[in-house]
Image (spheres, helix red, strand yellow):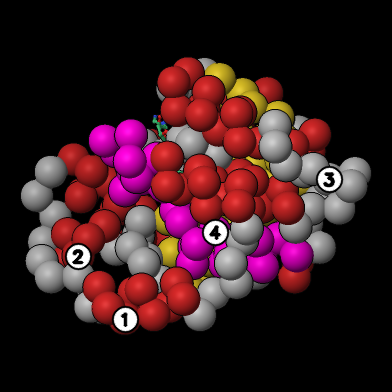
Amino acid sequence: MPPFVSDELEQYAVNHTTDPGPVFNELAEEVRRDVPSAGMMSGRTVGYLLNTLVFATGAKRVLEVGTFVGYSALMMSSALPEDGELVTCDVDPEATAIAQRYWARSPHSSKIRLALGPALETMATLEPGIDLVFIDADKENYSNYYERAMELIAPAGLIVIDNVLWGGRVLDPRDESDRAIAALNDRVQADERVNNVMLTVRDGVMLIRKR
Ligand SMILES: C[S@@+](CC[C@H](N)C(=O)[O-])C[C@H]1O[C@@H](n2cnc3c(N)ncnc32)[C@H](O)[C@@H]1O
């Protein structure tokens, strides 16, 4: 499957998105150099989309499902007010150690709480009233994350789901991850509780709000 837009246009989009500064750029550089699964990192365009959504919605409580190296968590926390909080879940101590090293260099790190452990277990402990939930972890659990997010989200909150195009494989799902994402997209589209829009940014981002 060819990229949705050419590498040149993707780079053009990056070049016309605000430069997030040295902490983000050095994190991205280290990850691209040293971490084999670097492609999982959201990067500048999706990062700034998340940052803008947190800012524009006035979110105070944010939940992230899938921290990895902490790029998106730091992007979202940068847009939170001083008394805001972002809980971010992951099972990977190595990737999140990188995250913590870079968060420590940011004035926004005090707003981030890392929850190491399976995200569904962490989500079970959280109180409802979360303003924005960003789902970006193991694809097989996407529908479970969505259903729990629907319980946790505030009435005017926003659920954001990454990788909903899955490199185009949603058009012809073959393995478990392909089927899980295609099934979630269909579930959201048929869900009468919500309004949703699928954006073709990078690997696809779904925005969902309750009706
Ligand atoms: C795509 S990466 C997250 C990228 C990050 N949100 C960003 O935009 O830079 C997915 C992460 O989900 C984590 N993950 C996988 N299974 C998980 C689970 N059951 N609970 C929590 N995190 C999980 C992986 O360890 C990985 O770091």
Whether residue 145 sits left or right of residue 37 in the image: it is right
Q: Nearer the viewer, mark 4 or mark 1?
A: 1
The residue nearer to you, when weighing 57 against 28, is 28
Asked if marks 3 and 4 touch (Cβ < 8 Å), the reply is no
Asked if marks 4 and 1 touch (Cβ < 8 Å), the reply is no
Instruction: Name the residue located 36 percent from the left edge and 73 percent from the top edge.
Output: 11
Badge 3 marks a residue whose secondary structure is loop
The image quadrant where one finds ligand 1 is top left
Q: Amino acid at mark 4?
A: Gly
Q: Please tell me whether residue 145 is drawn above or below residue 164 in the rendered image.
A: above
Q: Nearer the viewer, mark 2 or mark 1?
A: 1
Q: Earlier in the sequence, mark 3 or mark 4?
A: 4
The image shows a total of numbered marks equal to 4
Question: Residues in magenta?
Answer: 31-55
Cα distance, mark 2 to mark 1?
Answer: 18 Å
Whether residue 88 sits left or right of residue 110 in the image: it is left
Q: Amino acid at mark 1?
A: Leu
Q: Earlier in the sequence, mark 4 or mark 1?
A: 1
Q: Please tell me whether residue 41 is drawn above or below residue 125 in the rendered image.
A: below
Residue bearing mark 4: 47
Q: Residues within 10 Å of mark 2 (few under 14, many from 20)?
A: some
Residue bearing mark 2: 168
Cα distance, mark 4 to mark 1?
Answer: 17 Å
* Residue 49 drawn in magenta: yes
Residue bearing mark 1: 9
Instruction: Name the residue located 66 percent from the left edge and 52 percent from the top edge.
Output: 76
Q: Please tell me whether residue 14 is drawn above or below residue 71 in the rendered image.
A: below
